[in-house]
Amino acid sequence: MPDEAAPPPDHGHGAARGPSRRSLGRAAAAVAATPVLAGTWQALTASTAAAADGADGAQGRAWTGTWACAETRVPAADGTAFADQTLRQVVHTSAGGRALRIRLTNRYGTEPLVVGEVRVAHSVPGDGTAVVPGTDRAVRFGGRTSVTLAPGTRRWSDPVRLDVPTAADLAVSVHLPQPTPADTVHRSAFQRTYVAAGNVAAKPAVEPQRTVTSWYFLAGIAVTGAAPGTGAGAGTGARQAIVTFGDSITDGSRTTVGANRRWPDALARRLRDEAGRPGTGVLNAGIGGNRLLRDPNPPPGSNAENYAPYFGEAGIRRFARDVLDQPAARHVVVLLGINDLGHPGRDAPRDEEVTAADLINGHRSLIRQAHARGLRIHGATVLPVEGDDLGFYTPEREAVRQTVNDWIRTAGEYDGTVDFDAATRDPAQPRRLLPAYDSGDGLHPNDAGMAAMAAAVPLRLFT
């Protein structure tokens, strides 16, 4: 088996620098900068977000999201492509069930996405290339084993009968029979994906040509029915999803690859083990480098053009798709703002510096969108960054961070608050991360820091 790829390095709060090898002689258009400031945003409607799934979505009361990721486009420098290859992608569940549906995505594709076959199975612990005997299932779309997604669309599969435990690793194998540019991606998965030759989706084990740490064309998994070994039935009040909405800290940057030690993973464990709620899904909608107010806008000619599109659309723009469109979503926890502060002059033009009023108005936009759909929304304070390696910190930006955090704590506009700042800061130097929680860059918490963040979330928020 080839050597496993290391996780992509973080630049600009979660992205990877440098071009990847081009597999097709294609030039993708760079993402267009879309400034979105106070007073100018317009939320996507929930119907717009849901329409891409067609009539066969998993939005009914019986379905609960158990895993999700937020998709982005790719920079022109990323020529990753697949041709007659199988992607065996490993994902980690939160809620359990007796059946599942899988959501494929061609969100940023410019051509139809042709999928030859999809299979799902339990992944062998410690070996993502292999599946547990007897668990492999075919995944169908409208009764067919193949499916084609139009550009800009996503689609849920038909229900698949398979026991899905809480905290299980599933292997989703996707065969791509035609030359396929990898233009819809979740770049920093902190989980391994195995790329193998030919259609080996149904094979008990695959021999990968290469191993990457990204998810491609995969957006979500929903479950229904009681989690195996529990009494948490479908349709009960216990079945709901919590969406964690943020940047690379929520995405899991600098955590151990394949170990599921992001703070949302640890929160799911607390809900299961401490609160006895195996029917509650925790969905990770974090994107490394994401900003609350603005789309990526790398300065022309800068190296940021090679990675900034991985940062995803502005939080206020993607909220409808990545939060409101999740099956059984009832709560959302928001941790955004540090990249709005840190990117200007580095990964974005200097004139995109933000004020506390700008950020507060952005948070208010998310609150309005959530409340319009009946979701409870909880604000998380922004972590300290003094001494960071990326140059995010300045005294002026620190003043903005403190003002925004005070507003999150005291204004009462969020339905609840989570004080990640207090949970991770060094009491002796409160503008810095506690050294025991620092991954080494002064910005991202390590595994222990992620656990501390999850421990700081009041579980009573989700009753």
Image (cartoon, helix red, strand yellow):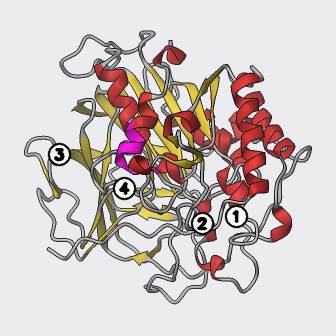
Residue mark closest to the camera, 3 vs 1: 1
User: Residue 73 falls in which quadrant of the image?
Assistant: bottom right
Q: Which residue is mark 4?
A: 146
Q: Which residue is mark 3?
A: 136
Residue mark closest to the camera, 2 vs 4: 2
Residue at screen point 50% across, 45% down: 250
User: Residue 341 falls in which quadrant of the image?
Assistant: bottom right
Residue at screen point 74% across, 19% down: 412
Question: What secondary structure prevails in the magenta region?
Answer: helix
Callout 4, which amino acid? Ser
Residue mark closest to the camera, 3 vs 4: 3
Residue at screen point 42% across, 17% down: 239
Instruction: Of the two numbered discs 2 and 4 on the same chain, state the one appearing first in sequence.
Output: 2
Instruction: Of the two numbered discs 1 and 2 on the same chain, state the one appearing first in sequence.
Output: 2
Q: CA distance from mark 3 to mark 4?
A: 17 Å
Q: CA distance from mark 3 to mark 2?
A: 39 Å
Of residue 165 and residue 305, the one placed in the foreground of this image is: 305
The residue range painted magenta reads 445-451
Q: Which residue is mark 1?
A: 343
As helix, strand or loop, the secondary structure at mark 1 comes to loop
Can I make out residue 221 in this image? no
Q: CA distance from mark 1 to mark 2?
A: 7 Å
Callout 3, which amino acid? Asp
Q: Position of residue 279 (x, y in %)?
A: 36, 20
Residue at the extreme right of the image, as rendered: 39
